[in-house]
Amino acid sequence: MDRILDIIMPETASAPPKARKRYVRRSSLAALAIVLSSGLAVSVRPEALFFGVEALLIMFLVWEFSVLMRALDELQFRIHMTALAIAGGVAATSCTVLSVLALAGEGQLPALAGALALPVMGMGYYFALFVIARRYS
């Protein structure tokens, strides 16, 4: 089971068992709540309420991630922060490029840039974490 979690949630691979268990349980429940809330927002249509709930859930996920990071030792913390810095740079650059393209004439790209910021950062974080962690193993 631990090997599967290392693949699904690589940020927990080096965390202490107690912190790992807490993070997996709470972040999985919050992610499920976000998916359910998104489905309800599409079918019921009071989007403002559901988007507010989703914003709170995303803030909860960020808080849980910070709790997990504080449980790591110094080397693992450095690896994760380096991966986050690289991912943030990639996401910011991607969003800026999309916004500049929008200024050049494409109308809908600024909304797309904002919507893609978090997914691009997440994928960039996992990729950077994989590459950086190999350096220390």
Image (cartoon, helix red, strand yellow):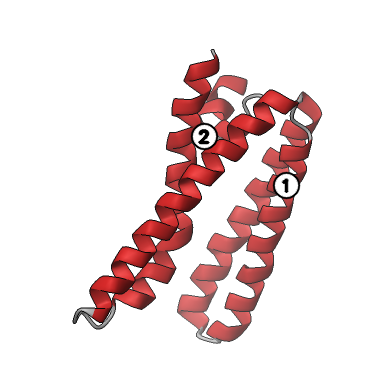
- Percent position (x, y) of residue 78? 64, 32
Q: Are marks 1 and 2 in contact (CB under 8 Å)?
A: no
Taking the spot 48% from the left edge, 43% from the top edge, the residue there is 86
Label 1: few (<14), some or many (≥20) within 10 Å? few
Which callout, 1 or 2, points at the residue further toward the start of the chain? 2
Picture residue at 24% right of the left edge, 72% below the top: 101
Answer above or below: position of 4 versus 99.
above
What residue is shown with label 1? 66
> Which residue type carries mark 1?
Ser
Mark 2 burial class by Cα count in 10 Å: few <14, some 14-19, many 20+ = few
Element on which disc 2 rests: helix
Q: Is residue 135 above or below residue 25?
A: above
Dot in front, 1 or 2: 1
Mark pair 1, 2: CA separation: 18 Å
Element type where label 1 sits in the image: helix
In the picture shown, does residue 118 fall above or below 22?
below
Q: Residue at x 52, y 69 (%)?
A: 38
Quadrant position of the N terminus in the picture: top right
- Which quarter of the picture shows residue 105? bottom left
Q: Judge from the rendering whether residue 100 lies leftward or rightward of residue 121; answer left or right.
A: left
Residue 1 visible from this viewpoint: no
Q: Position of residue 50 (x, y in %)?
A: 60, 77
Q: How many marks?
A: 2
Q: Which residue is mark 2?
A: 8
Relative vertical location of residue 80 with respect to residue 101 in this rendering, above or below: above
Residue 78 in view (yes/no): yes
| Of residues 17 and 34, the one drawn nearer to the viewer in this rendering | 17
- Residue 61 position in % (x across, y down): 67, 54
Q: Nearer the viewer, residue 64 or 100?
A: 100
* Snapshot quadrant of residue 68: top right
